[in-house]
Image (tube, rainbow, N blue to C red):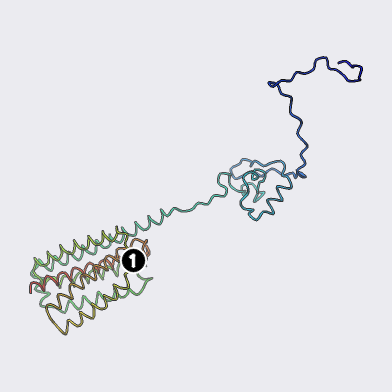
Amino acid sequence: MAQNKSGYTRLENPPQFSSVNPPPPPPPPPYNAGVPVVVRPAPPTAFGNHREAPDILSIPILQQLLTSPKRTAVDRTNSRFLTVRHSDKPGHSDPPPEYENKQFIGSGLDNEAIRRLFIQKVFSVLSLQLAVTCGFVAVFTFEPHVKLFVMQNAWTYWVGYVVFLVPYVVILCCGEFRRTHPWNLVSLSILTLAMSYMVGVISSFYDTDIMMMAIGITVLVCFTVIVFSLQTRYDFTSCYGVLFVCFIVVLFFGILCIFLYNRILDLIYASLGALIFTCFLAVDAQLLLGNKTLSLSPEEHVFAALNLYLDIIQIFLYILRIFGKSRG
């Protein structure tokens, strides 16, 4: 290094700069964004590892987070400057970062599983009821001694009707009772036995071929209606009020037919009755689904099975009456 005449110092080996070796960048200006605040490291989590915490947090960023109207939604660019601690005690801090601000929302699979179990339970109980009724009908139809006893003692039918009516009213009116196990099943069993006896008594007054045709048509109609109502998108439950009004009209029409006995009127009454209870069967089947206007609670499996059972029995009796009147 040498000094020239003008007083400047000349470097003997000056550094060479080129486009390949650019000059070094100037030093960064001092950080004056605010007065730094020291933050203590976060306590260990329940999993034993320490949470990563920054060493400093600038005052402007902290003021922005505290004065922002949406303090719960921290900006991603600034969220790394802040560590929120719920407790200083080990084992009581917030969960690991991958579990933060996540809400676990149910997908409805549990409700669907409960609804499927409810439907299976209803149809299981219904199958047992129909099996018992078919057994009674077979005995009263093919056993001549039983058929002769029933024809000579018709009062037993009214005894069976009274026995049927008592548990039916209890199940229909007492919601807490029909959801209480095992008394709901006991009442349903008594009701099923009484109804099976009455159906058997009625069947004993008809020929065997008429009985077989009525059973076959009833099975075909009920199976088709139940499958269709469970698969279709049309909501039959929205027509429940209209069906109830039609049922009241048919009921008064049947009372009128008692005093004005006529074969044609009796056929019309039986046809209307079969049609009304076929519609009720479609409505009661859709009440099991839970995605229509009206639906039953999964706790009402006894009540649901009772509705379907009575609908099928009424359809069978009306079809049997149609064939019996058509034969004269």
Above or below residue 25? Residue 159 is below
Q: Which residue is mark 1?
A: 182
- Residue in view at x 91 percent, y 20 percent: 7
Mark 1 secondary-structure assignment = loop
Q: Amino acid at mark 1?
A: Pro
The residue carrying pointer 1 sits among few (fewer than 14), some (14 to 19) or many (20 or more) residues within 10 Å by Cα, namely few
Above or below residue 245? Residue 223 is above
Q: Quadrant of residue 147?
A: bottom left
Q: Is residue 57 left or right of residue 249?
A: right
Q: Nearer the viewer, residue 117 or 8?
A: 8
Q: Quadrant of residue 120?
A: bottom left
Q: Is residue 2 left or right of residue 241?
A: right
Residue 134 point in image, percent of width and height = 18, 64
What quarter of the picture does the C terminus occupy? Answer: bottom left
Q: Exactly how many numbered labels are in the figure?
A: 1
Q: Nearer the viewer, residue 187 or 271?
A: 271
Residue 174 point in image, percent of width and height = 36, 73
Q: Nearer the viewer, residue 103 or 73?
A: 73
Q: Quadrant of residue 316?
A: bottom left
Above or below residue 129? Residue 160 is below
Q: Which residue sits furthest front?
A: 6
- Residue in view at x 61 percent, y 40 percent: 49
Q: Is residue 49 left or right of residue 134?
A: right
